[in-house]
Image (spheres, grey):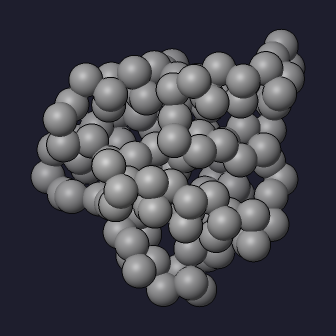
Amino acid sequence: MATILVVDDDPGVLSTVTFMLQVNDHAVTAVSSVSECLSKLDTEKFELIITDILMPTTDGTELIQILRKREDAPPIIAMSGGGNIVSANDALSLAKVLAKGVLEKPFLEDELNAVINDVLGQAQTT
């Protein structure tokens, strides 16, 4: 299975996604901010990043743009449930242009696994 870095500012979402990944034998590191994510990437290698789009301070779209400039960046799956100002659909529309895969919250474990398999399959063929 894959080594995955999950980024989400909501502790409940972070623990739920981490659990879904771990029961499918993925090695998971969970962080709650873009700065933590970038720090982890400086010291560890991951096969995949799953990031929330709408987060305070630095959001997921900014993270994706930062990572796209790095040669060693793993593929990215963006997830969003929307927010007070932006709908999930609007947030994910932008993410579809930037990320390899997208998930609208809430999502089921099967949906998560399907997107992971699709994205990791794309990464192996490129």
User: Which residue of the protein is positioned furthest toward the top in this rendering?
Assistant: 85
Of the pair 111 and 124, the residue shown nearer to us: 124
Residue at the outermost left position: 43
111 with respect to 74 (left or right): right
Q: Residue at x 34, y 60 (%)?
A: 124
Answer whether residue 6 is visible to the viewer in this image.
no
Q: Is residue 84 left or right of residue 118?
A: right
Q: Is residue 86 above or below residue 2?
A: above
User: How many discs mark residues in the rendered view?
Assistant: 0
In which quadrant will I find the N terminus?
A: bottom left
- The relative height of residue 97 versus residue 49 in the rendered view (above or below) is above
Residue at (32%, 31%) from the top-left corner? 67
Task: Return the x and y of residue 27 as percentages of the image width and height.
Answer: 39, 76
Q: Nearer the viewer, residue 56 or 122?
A: 122
Residue 58: x and y in percent read 48, 21
Q: Position of residue 77 (x, y in %)?
A: 54, 46
Q: Is residue 80 visible?
A: yes
Is residue 36 toward the left or the right of residue 32 in the image? left
Quick check: 41 above or below 68? below
- Tell me what residue is drawn at x 80 percent, y 58 percent: 107
Tell me: residue 5, above or below residue 25: above
The residue closer to the viewer here, 90 or 20, is 90
- Percent across and percent down for residue 39 are 24, 42
Q: Residue at x 17, y 35 (%)?
A: 71
Q: Quadrant of residue 44?
A: bottom left
